[in-house]
Amino acid sequence: MNISNSSGNNQKKRNFQIEAFKHKVVVDPKYADKTWKILQHAINEIYNHNASGLSFEELYRNAYNMVLHKFGEKLYVGLVSTMTSHLMTMSNCIENANGGMFLEELNNRWDDHNKALQMIRDILMYMDRTYVPSSHKIPVHELGLNLWRDKVIHLSGIQVRLQNTLLQLIHKERTGEVINRGLMRNIIKMLMDLGPSVYQQNFERPFLEVSGEFYRVESQEFIECCVCGDYLQKAERRLNEEIDRVSHYLDARSEVKITNVVEKEMITNHITRLVHMDSGLVNMLVDDKYEDLNRIYSLFHRVPNGLSTIREVMTSYLRETGKHLVSDPEKLKDPVEFVQCLLDKKDKYDKIIALAFSNDKTFQNALNSSFEFFINLNPRSPEFISLFVDDKLRKGLKGVSEEDVEDVLDKVMTLFRYLHEKDVFEKYYKQHLAKRLLSGKDSSDDAERSLVLKLKTECGYQFTSKLEGMFTDMKTSKDTIAGFYMKHGADLEAGPTLAVQVLTTGSWPTQPSTSCNLPAELTSLCDRFKSYYLGAHSGRRLSWQTNMGTADVKANFGKGQKHELTVSTYQMCVLMLFNDTDHLTFKELEQATEIPSLDLKRCLQSLACVKGKNVLKKEPMTKDIGEDDVFSVNEKFTSKFYKVKIGTVIAQKESEPEKHETRQRVEEDRKPQIEAAIVRIMKARRVLDHNNIIAEVIKQLQARFLANPAEIKKRIESLIERDFLERDGSDRKLYQYIA
């Protein structure tokens, strides 16, 4: 090696050279044998538990020098030979261990080998780092594991015995016996340390096979003698036991494999039978067995097609029971009970899905689909839901918080969303709302407005614009009547008091034009109000809707009984006639009042046939009103209340003719909506074929009603006749928009 040093421009460079030793280094020919003897003795002492007297620094130096002097091969071969000799001795001891001592001996010898291996690796560290990689040998630690595997574990006498012993212990644990889990953990970890293939071949594969057979037999025994809930409990317990077993002494990667075995044998293979047992899913749903339902959901969630099987059975049962509910003649007699049953059913299954099915969206969708299916099987569902709302808002929700009121309205809205014919509900709701507003029987203006707001959010402004107009009319009417009394109040103090609601035509449901002969005391007052109103508003017309009014009448009965009666306008007209006569027949009442016959019968039923409200007597005393019945004042009428409210006997639901008439009105209202949708679509698309128009119209209108394709076709024909559309010259099924 040349080293140059320069300290300035004028100084000459000096070269130095380091040369090899002039004399030859001679190594003792017996050096390798002597050094190996020292190291071999040390390895023997380590295996014989006599390592305390060894100098590990000196042993490391000897091993270092052997490798340095190119005796690495001799060192490595000697290590293999010595280690093999000791492992053969160990394997004999393990094989000779009796009964339960077999695993103990194996575990102790494995522990000894590991400790020895650690010390040997420390001594031979230099060989491990230099000679082993350069000569492509196996590192010391891995070599020790491989030798243990080949010379101990894979000996036929040990391998079979080890496998059988481990499987027997697990079987004992499954049948309730307590085993030494710590020892099991050590032995299983030994197999895992020897490599994945050793663990799988010597334990995992046979373990999974015998487990499959065990659970196959056990599941068959269980299912023959257990109800579904008990069987599921046992299956759940077995799954948890296997998961626990893995966490304590098996490889974590075995968890999926063993749970798959349990799931296949205990659940998948019996899935249909479990669900359809007498004590199966339907029984759990009927009896609200939340624990069992949660268990069946959790277990079936683990297996292929498990949840879909539960969903199908639940949906099938729901549709069948729902179909029965909506067609039950007894339920149809009372619309309020009918809707309450639907709400109770919905609450029941909502609770099941929340508590047992983890709020699973697929189950919620199945529930919604089922309700939509069977609610629309009954064409009267829209009417009945409106009657339910009417009942709740008329009677009021006394003692109920605002939150609870909102809850009831939200539940009603849930049923409303299922309706295909939302416009039919709107028709009935408008009629019922009108009666509540005009009779002053709505329990809470806030609740009324809240429901209208919910309908507006659900269906848009157009759906509720007329309903909101009804509220506006009620407020305007209060201001109008206040203005009337401010102007004429002094002249009207002695007579009856008048309250008038002025209703905008179009916002309120159309009423049949009915006339009624009002008492003379009221006729002049009504005329004065009419003059006042028309004087304040030019270009308007007023027509009295006497069938929608109410009145408070003071009445004197026998023995000085005095009461204030709250009645309908029709009832007031009837009662006022008895100021001038004692007896009147049905025909005489009809002629005097000119009230329509059907309405008069309902009116008289309320006055004469309702116990506790019978201010009139009827001869003969029957429930039905006949043409020749005679009526008179019931002088014996008494009530513990001064104010007595006499309701009109009304039809809770429409009669068949009324239903037919409502249906016709709905169909007529739909025609312009269908035509408007067709025009909107064609204006945007310009050219479209028949089937696509039908599909688009149905899609656009489904928020309000399910449009009938036959009716859509009629509306298309009508639009063609009126030159909004035309057929294509070459294809009659193709339509063009005429701009």
Image: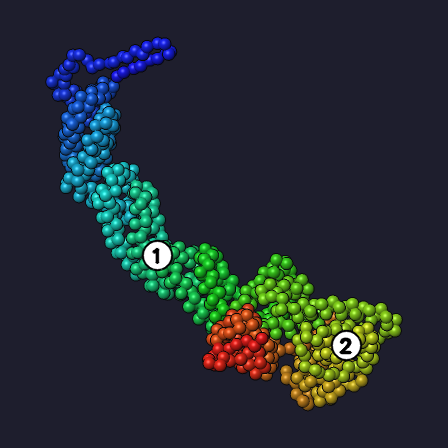
Counting other residues with Cα less than 10 Å from the Cα at mark 1, is it few (<14), some (14-19), or many (20 or more)? some
Element on which disc 2 rests: loop
Which amino acid type is marked by label 1? Val
Residue 675 position within the rendered picture, expressed as x and y whole percent measured from the top left: 57, 76
Q: Is residue 727 visible?
A: yes
Element on which disc 1 rests: loop
Which residue sits at x=46%, y=80%?
731
Residue 635's quadrant in the figure? bottom right
From the viewer's side, name the closer residue of 137 and 19.
19
Q: Label 2, on which residue? A: 540
Q: Does the residue at mark 1 contact the one at mark 2 (Cβ under 8 Å)?
A: no
What label sits on residue 303 in the rendered view? 1
From the viewer's side, name the closer residue of 582 and 315.
315
Which amino acid type is marked by label 2? Arg
Residue 622 position within the rendered picture, expressed as x and y whole percent measured from the top left: 64, 84
Q: CA distance from mark 1 to mark 2?
A: 73 Å
Q: Give the residue at the far right of this rendering.
A: 490
> Of marks 1 and 2, which one's residue comes earlier in the chain?
1
Q: Quadrant of the C terminus?
A: bottom right
How many marks the image carries: the answer is 2
